[in-house]
Image: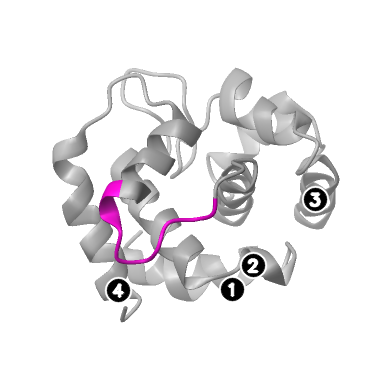
């Protein structure tokens, strides 16, 4: 999948399932940059690892976190119902590998669990910190971040 397909196919469906206040240029830039960083929007299954979906969630990590967090539990239940997925960690984990809309909703809701405001669209350094704090990557690759962040902004015309 390319970044334009995420913007035109995945985002409209995903953002229609969550509160409007969660859709913003800042959220979209961050979601695109994280998707590129995590999977390049190529790998639905982590290379030599357990994570699934373009935003690379682990069952006991991000999936469980979104399902259990007080600010996202009710929201993800509604998303799961709309996507016809049982709202439990094993089912969501299996589904996000091929359900890009659900995976995108999970990613946006994980960002929502962070108490800090989303970084400005042109603040790649703060966006990196936000990503690392939320995703807690085991082997972060900061050298690719600025390029992916710039690609996200360009694709969105920002």
In the current view of this chain or complex, which residue is farthest to the front? 116
In the current view of this chain or complex, which residue is farthest to the left? 143
- Range of the magenta residues? 117-125
Q: Is disc 3 placed on a helix, strand or loop?
A: helix
- Using the numbered discs, state the Cα–Cα distance from disc 2 to disc 3 in whole angstroms: 12 Å
- Using the numbered discs, state the Cα–Cα distance from disc 4 to disc 3 in whole angstroms: 28 Å
Q: Which mark is residue 133?
A: none
Q: Residue 102 at what x, y percent from top left?
A: 64, 50
- Using the numbered discs, state the Cα–Cα distance from disc 1 to disc 3 in whole angstroms: 17 Å
Q: Residue 84 at what x, y percent from top left?
A: 80, 50
- Asked if the residues shown at circle 1 and circle 3 are in contact, with their CB atoms under 8 angstroms apart, the answer is no
Q: Which mark is residue 12?
A: 1
Q: What residue is at 68 percent from the left and 36 percent from the top?
A: 66
**Residue 65 in which image quadrant:** top right
Pointer 4 local density, CA inside 10 Å: few below 14, some 14–19, many at least 20? some
- Using the numbered discs, state the Cα–Cα distance from disc 2 to disc 4 in whole angstroms: 18 Å
Q: Which mark is residue 155?
A: 4
Q: What residue is at 32 percent from the left and 43 percent from the top?
A: 128
Q: Which mark is residue 15?
A: 2
Q: Is residue 145 magenta?
A: no
Q: Is disc 1 placed on a helix, strand or loop?
A: helix
Q: Residue 97 at what x, y percent from top left?
A: 53, 39
């Amino acid at each position: 999948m390319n970044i334009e397909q995420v913007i035109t196919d995945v985002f409209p469906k995903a953002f229609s399932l969550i509160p409007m206040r969660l859709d913003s240029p800042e959220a979209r830039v961050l979601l695109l940059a994280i998707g590129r960083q995590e999977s390049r929007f190529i790998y639905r299954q982590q290379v030599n690892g357990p994570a699934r979906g373009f935003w690379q969630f682990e069952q006991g990590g991000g999936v469980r976190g979104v399902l259990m967090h007080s600010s996202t539990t009710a929201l993800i239940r509604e998303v799961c119902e709309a996507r016809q997925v049982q709202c439990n960690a094993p089912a969501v984990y299996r589904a996000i590998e091929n359900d890009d809309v659900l995976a995108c909703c999970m990613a946006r809701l994980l960002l929502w669990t962070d108490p800090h405001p989303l970084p400005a669209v042109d603040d790649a350094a703060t966006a990196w910190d936000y990503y690392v704090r939320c995703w807690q990557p085991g082997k972060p690759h900061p050298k690719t971040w600025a390029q992916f962040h710039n690609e996200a902004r360009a694709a969105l015309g920002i």
